[in-house]
Image (cartoon, rainbow, N blue to C red):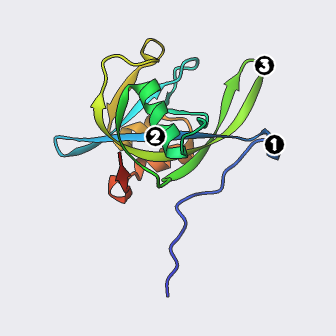
Amino acid sequence: MSMNRAAQQPLRVPSARKRDMRTQFGAICWRMKKGKLQVLLVTTRTTRRWTPPKGWPIDGLTPAGSAAREAYEEAGVSGSISETCLGIYSYTKELAGDDLPCVVALFPLKVERKMSMWPEKPERRRRWMSPKKAASRVREPELARLLRNFDPGVARLKR
């Protein structure tokens, strides 16, 4: 009998107390173009770094539903999302006066519609890229690993 190694690595949370940690939900938005897998990243509003669309839990929505809503609001995309979490990563949200440690649960979203106008278009840029390139553009090592190893075949999608 063999045991599979866990893909998720331990999270390092610098000097945070348990009650200080916040949870967000995000989407790995993906498509196939000319037979090649592409993922979508957006820039953050303040630091302009690249990240998947993500945000706080939304009342009345599942974690995957919250991720899908964030994909629409931040990146202007919609499609089929899986309720299966692909993994989590940690980061520090930079807020005025204080930094807030967060963990983000990621859900795969197969993009079926790309809007020309969306709520946060004036505040963000979006860009399609290979998973390898996306991994090189993000700051967080855990997120880079999830992007680099992303396989849309593991997602059970639903509309």
Of callouts 2 and 3, the N-terminal one: 2
User: Which residue is under mark 2?
Assistant: 27
Residue 15 appears in view:
no
Give the numbered dot on residue 97.
3
Task: Report whether 139 appears left or right of 152.
Answer: right
Q: Marks 2 and 1, Cα distance to the nearest angstrom? A: 25 Å
> Which is more foreground, mark 2 or mark 3?
2
Residue that appears at 30% across and 18% down: 116
Residue that appears at 38% across and 55% down: 155
Single out the residue that lies furthest toward the front: 60
Tell me if residue 135 comes above or below residue 85 in the rendering.
above
Q: Residue 56 in the image: x percent, y percent?
A: 61, 34
Residue that appears at 50% across and 53% down: 85
Of callouts 2 and 1, the N-terminal one: 1
Q: Marks 3 and 1, Cα distance to the nearest angstrom? A: 18 Å
Of callouts 3 and 1, the N-terminal one: 1
Q: Residue 62 in the image: x percent, y percent?
A: 54, 45
Tell me if residue 32 comes above or below residue 48 in the rendering.
below
